[in-house]
Every structure is written in C-alpha cells, then in structure tokens.
Amino acid sequence: MKSVEDDSMAPFDSEFYLILNVAVGGINGYFPDNSVNAGYSKPWENNSNQAAFDFWSKKDDWYPTWSDSSAMQINDIKIYQN
C-alpha cells in the first residue's frame, strides 16, 4: 500500500463500494407497452400507477424465463483513473 503522503492511487487507496445493477420494469418508455419476450407480453403499462405491482403480479409468467444463461454475468471489472 502506498504511504499516506503519496496520493497517486487516490481514490483507490481507500475501501469503496462498486454497485452493479440489473433493473427490471420502469415506466420511462424504454420497454414499449407492446414488448414481447419469450412469448410473454410486457406485464405492466408505462402509464400505470402501480407498474411494480403489475410486474410482480405476473411473476408466474416471467419468472420461468429467467435462468443462469439470461442473468447478468460479470467476467471482469476494470476501473481506471485519468
């Protein structure tokens, strides 16, 4: 580890968290209301006031389409400092 006086590794000289996220749902129009995946229609509408509830209510439809092969798989993470 570098000495405290040497800040050339900052901010990587201190513990930090890196968050990787896979998001589902959303009402921003990224997934059009007529979207179909694996034969299933999108289970919520972009103008719904309860889109998250609608999504969860249809879990028996979409959950079987999720598998290890469709999951986010991370092989490598590289962080660079300019």
Image (cartoon, grey):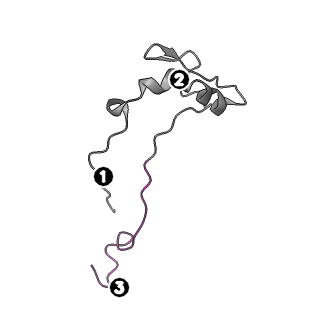
| Label whose residue precedes the other's in the sequence (1 or 3) | 3
Residue 4: x %, y % from top left = 35, 85
- Which disc is residue 60 wearing? 2
Position of the N terminus by quadrant? bottom left
Query: Magenta span has 12?
Result: yes
Instruction: Tell whether 28 sits left or right of 38.
Output: right
Q: Answer yes or no: do the residues labelled 1 and 2 have beta carbons within 8 Å?
A: no
Query: Which region of the structure is painted magenta?
Result: 1-20
| Label whose residue precedes the other's in the sequence (2 or 3) | 3
Please name the predominant secondary structure of the magenta segment in the image: loop
Q: Which residue is mark 1?
A: 77
Q: Answer yes or no: do the residues labelled 1 and 3 have beta carbons within 8 Å?
A: no
Quadrant position of residue 67: top left
Residue 63: x %, y % from top left = 48, 27
Q: CA distance from mark 1 to mark 2?
A: 33 Å
Q: Which residue is mark 3?
A: 4
Name the element at disc 3: loop
